[in-house]
Image (spheres, grey):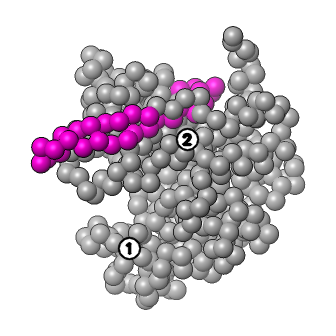
Amino acid sequence: MSDEANPFESLQSQIDEAANYLDVGGDEIERLKHPERVLETNLTIEGDDGDLERFTAFRSQFNGDRGPYKGGIRYHPQVSRDEVKALSGWMTYKTAIVDIPLGGGKGGIALDPDDYSEAELERLTRSFAKELRPLIGEDRDVPAPDVNTGQREMNWIKDTYETLENTTEPGVITGKALDSGGSEGRVEATGRSTVIAAREAFDYLDKDLEGATVAVQGYGNAGWIAAKLIDEMGATVVAASDSSGGIYNPDGFDPVAAKEHKNETGSVVGYEESDEEITNDEVLTLDVDLLIPAALENAIDADLAEDVAADVISEAANGPLTPAADEVLEETDVFVIPDILANAGGVTVSYFEWVQNRQRFYWSEERVNEELETIIVDAFDALVETYEEHDLENPRTAAYVVAIQRVADAFEEAGSWP
Ligand code: GLU
């Protein structure tokens, strides 16, 4: 893993690359490379031992031209101002490529949640929600889960907001538990779009998904669900990894049993159906038909990209390839389904959750999955059309061309304001 690439610079270079194919002025492109605003706040809470501890937290509102800012909140030691800015930009182009009426935002707190008790995390989350309160709202900015956050944190934020505002407004946040106004299908949605996009890519490339070999780097919510669903589609999951290492069996293994092992022991490592223990980098360079990076940014840098042997990559993580890695994979003809499309299922079902919250009318899981399928397939088709029209080398550039044009059109249609 490389930590050399600054994710914000990666985002900006992806935008610059797409700008070559767009009829959008340089001044407007400049605007689309920066967030509209970033909140940086210091949260001080009392630990269980009675001592005070300070945490740095951010919320970046990147672009609201197409609707309320939308994007998750992550808890991770690596959270920084630039990382949050980059992730909020990726959200802007993610909501645009799938054409849902939302903008882009992202937040985070720099900490390792494993070091804190549930009570401490609740105090910290409620303290962040208090700081976020003037910025968020179902028509302003709608946070959601991201790395190391989930239904529990979303429920706390909803409760804090609603209590302080003396209202009920479940659409202020998405990714909630079902009984708190969550949506069917939301937990699985990121992994689901990753495999729908992979299925479409295999079809486009005339490759058979039945029996195709798959490696999954990262076995959190997105990674393990993608593994489970691709297995159900007839592919064979041969490798998986998490922060403790990787497992490999060339004949394949049951991804659900691997997840159960991880639930029991904390890692996929040691899972009995695995033939061999391998490193995270080895998982990323296996000779497989499909690679699913599902962990953090910069998992594959230019050096590692030289060794990538997969035919197709479907990015469940945000920003797993550095721009230099992208260039290498272009040369070696690896078809990369970009994060802003491949993992857009999460925010798409968040959009459905928000719609259901506003209507106070809830959909079946079947309806959620059908509507998700349509949105991801349409977005993939739009990507391919632009990819072919401009004879592009990289599907990522095609996705950005489509997405940036949509944001720029909304900005131009709004006209100027002094
Ligand atoms: N954190 C997810 C993402 O990166 C979901 C965001 C959302 O649902 O708003 O796309």
Determine whether label 2 and label 1 are within 8 Å by CB: no
**Mark 2 → mark 1, Cα distance in angstroms:** 28 Å
State whether residue 178 is above or below residue 408: below
When asked about the image quadrant of residue 93, the answer is: top right
| Front one among 8 and 238 | 8
Point 39% across, 39% down: residue: 57
Q: Tell me the magenta residue range.
A: 40-68
* Residue 187 image offset from top left, x and y in percent: 40, 49
Q: Secondary structure at mark 1?
A: loop
State whether residue 31 is above or below residue 277: above
State whether residue 412 is above or below residue 109: above
**Which residue is at the far top?**
418
* Residue 10 image offset from top left, x and y in percent: 65, 52
Residue 63 is covered by the magenta coloring? yes
Characterize the local packing of mark 1: few (<14), some (14-19) or many (20 or more) Cα atoms within 10 angstroms. few
Q: Which mark is residue 85?
A: 2
Residue 317 in view in this figure? yes
For residue 335, side relative to residue 393 (left or right) = left
| Front one among 199 and 85 | 85
Image quadrant occupied by the N terminus: bottom right
Residue kind at label 1, given as amino acid type: Ser
Residue kind at label 2, given as amino acid type: Lys
Point 86% across, 35% down: residue: 23
